[in-house]
Amino acid sequence: MTFATIANLLTMLLCIAVTVQSQRVKRALDTIRRGDLAQVVTALDQSTVQARIVLSELKGTLAAGSGQVAAAAEGKAVLDELRMMIEIADAAAERLATAGSANRAADVSEAVS
């Protein structure tokens, strides 16, 4: 799919969404014109309750996300510390290998003499 095709599909989806929303707004305006104020108030109450539910869920998601960010930062700190420990261990192992080969060379030279 090319970029133009994807853009056209996205535009079509947005147009459909706008059409649906405009129909909903039209119905709401017709209800207000007819004077069904009780129905409008009920719909607004339901919308308010739904919005509060969504907001509480978003707050929970945000709290969980911030905990994950803290855990990721702590994990990065541990990773950096482990990398440093690995570098120190590699350097120590290299020194031990060098010392071991030097001792073997000294032992061979003593045995030959």
Image: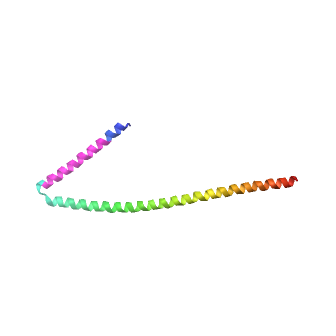
Q: Is residue 63 left or right of residue 72?
A: left
Residue 49 x/y as whole percent: 26, 62
- Which residue shows up at 28% across the image and 60% down it? 51
Q: Which residue is nearer to you in this view: 109 or 42?
A: 109
Give above or below for 27 relative to 62: above
Inspect the magenta stretch and tell me whether residue 12 lies in it.
yes
Q: How many marks?
A: 0
The picture quadrant where one finds residue 6 is top left
Colour mapping used in the image: rainbow
Q: Quadrant of the N terminus?
A: top left
Q: Is residue 58 left or right of residue 97?
A: left
Instruction: Specify start and end residues of the magenta stretch as a single range.
Output: 10-32
- Which residue shows up at 66% across the image and 56% down it? 91
Question: Farthest right residue?
Answer: 113
- Which residue shows up at 74% across the image and 56% down it? 99
Q: Is residue 57 left or right of residue 109?
A: left
- Which residue shows up at 37% across the image and 62% down it? 60
Q: Which residue is nearer to you in this view: 65 or 101?
A: 101
Decide whether the magenta segment is chiefly helix, strand or loop: helix
Question: Farthest left residue?
Answer: 34
Residue 34 x/y as whole percent: 11, 54
Inspect the magenta stretch and tell me whether residue 17 lies in it.
yes
Give above or below for 24 relative to 45: above
Give above or below for 113 relative to 14: below
Q: Is residue 106 left or right of residue 11?
A: right
Residue 86 x/y as whole percent: 61, 57
